[in-house]
Image (cartoon, rainbow, N blue to C red):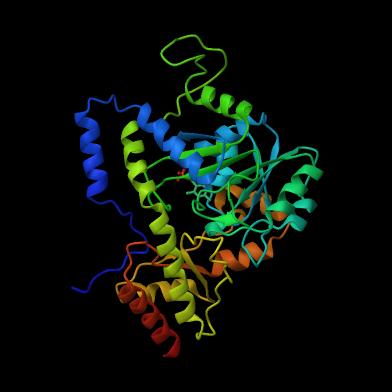
Amino acid sequence: MQEFIPQMEPWFDDHESAAVSLYLQSGGWVTEHQKTSLFEEMLSTFTKSKYCMVTTNGTISLTLALLAIGLKPGDEVLIPNLTMIATANAGKLIGINPVFVDIEKETLCMDLGSAQKVMTKKTKALIYVSLNGRSGDMKKVMTFCKEHNIFLIEDAAQSLGSYFHGKHLGTFGSIGSFSFSVPKIITTGQGGALVTNSAKHMKTLRLSKDFGRIKGGIDIHGTLGWNFKFTDIQAVIGIEQMKKLAWRINRKKQIYRIYANTLKSISAIHMIPTNLIDTCPWFVDIFVSNPSALQAYLRSMGIGSRLMYPPLTSQKIYKDTSAKVTLPVSYHYGKSGLWLPSSSKLTDTQIMKVCESIKYYYSH
Ligand SMILES: *Cc1c(COP(=O)(O)O)cnc(C)c1O
């Protein structure tokens, strides 16, 4: 049997298993406690944000962020039309309506000119998604939000280890959100984190995650809250993953560089010019005229790949919103994108095998 190269796989080793085992032997209560606080501290130190709170996942984290800035049912939030569907669904859960905006071809992130055109009196926030670790000019994004008097929330789920001019993505807006689901830069199986410099937002976030309790272990509830807590088991894994982060960021950049250098001779393939000083590409994304056909060929060669997110307004639940505006750039990239094997575990030999297969496909 030939080896199969997966598009993505998580990487755990003896460090995670030893840490989990040690934690269980220590008699920890498993639910969130000191290990969770330590993981939060590591994340706020890494991103240079004052506060960090972890939660169940990177979808609920966005819901909590929208609640924390005071959004109400019926409010509208600007969302790029090319992102994981969770960005839009997070608000839907609490009756907030996504308004879809086209993207810039240089970054695949929200185009502010298009955003301007769909704003209404109900627009209360903009969720900026730094897709694949890339971003546009965050200074301009901040200015845009200030001028229109709307909140900036960042969905930086794919951007741990990515920066704009040296400042970590997720730290430009009121609140930034990260995800630790299995394919992300680091994983705790499920998990999400919110970062902010606002003590007020952090207080609201913590209350909503723990039933609105005025303090731990007491059943007096100052406000409405639910249960979106983490577990110390996940934190123990997250702490070990954080220790590998610097290495992993470097490797992800190397992987992207090898692909980009090797595939640049193939005119049928477009890659987004990427600044690898600021950006840690989460996945290696290429754009071709028929990604499904290339995917099928790669699969026959024992190589996994994944089709890019379809534009959100092409999804069943958001189709009705598509009639109002056309979002051509999101359609172009959403329909032509393919993610190549991108795990930080990939060897150079495996990357070359993928590149050789792609070269063969386009020369025959
Ligand atoms: C993964 C992801 C999410 C959702 O995170 P989960 O932890 O899977 O809930 C949200 N937005 C983007 C851009 C993502 O990539």
Look at the image and tell me whether residue 12 can be seen: yes
Give the answer, above or below, for where 307 lies relative to 15: below
Give the total of numbered labels: 0
Give the answer, above or below, for where 245 lies relative to 308: above
User: Where in the figure is residue 106, as x and y percent of width and height?
Assistant: 65, 67
Residue 252: image quadrant is bottom left
User: Where in the figure is residue 256, as x and y percent of width and height?
Assistant: 46, 69
Answer with left or right where residue 40 lies relative to residue 207: left
Residue drawn at the location 46% of the way across and 62% of the way down? 283
Could you say which is closer to the camera, residue 86 or residue 239? 239
User: Where in the figure is residue 319, as x and y percent of width and height?
Assistant: 62, 52
User: Where in the figure is residue 235, as x and y percent of width and height?
Assistant: 36, 37
* Quadrant assignment for the C terminus: bottom left
Residue drawn at the location 53% of the way across and 22% of the way down? 207
Look at the image and tell me whether residue 93 can be seen: no
Give the answer, above or below, for where 78 lies relative to 228: below
Answer with left or right where residue 90 lies relative to residue 147: left
Q: Residue furthest bottom?
A: 364
Residue 38: image quadrant is top left
Residue drawn at the location 58% of the way across and 59% of the way down? 134
Could you say which is closer to the camera, residue 188 or residue 15? 15
* Quadrant assignment for the N terminus: bottom left
Could you say which is closer to the camera, residue 217 or residue 88? 217
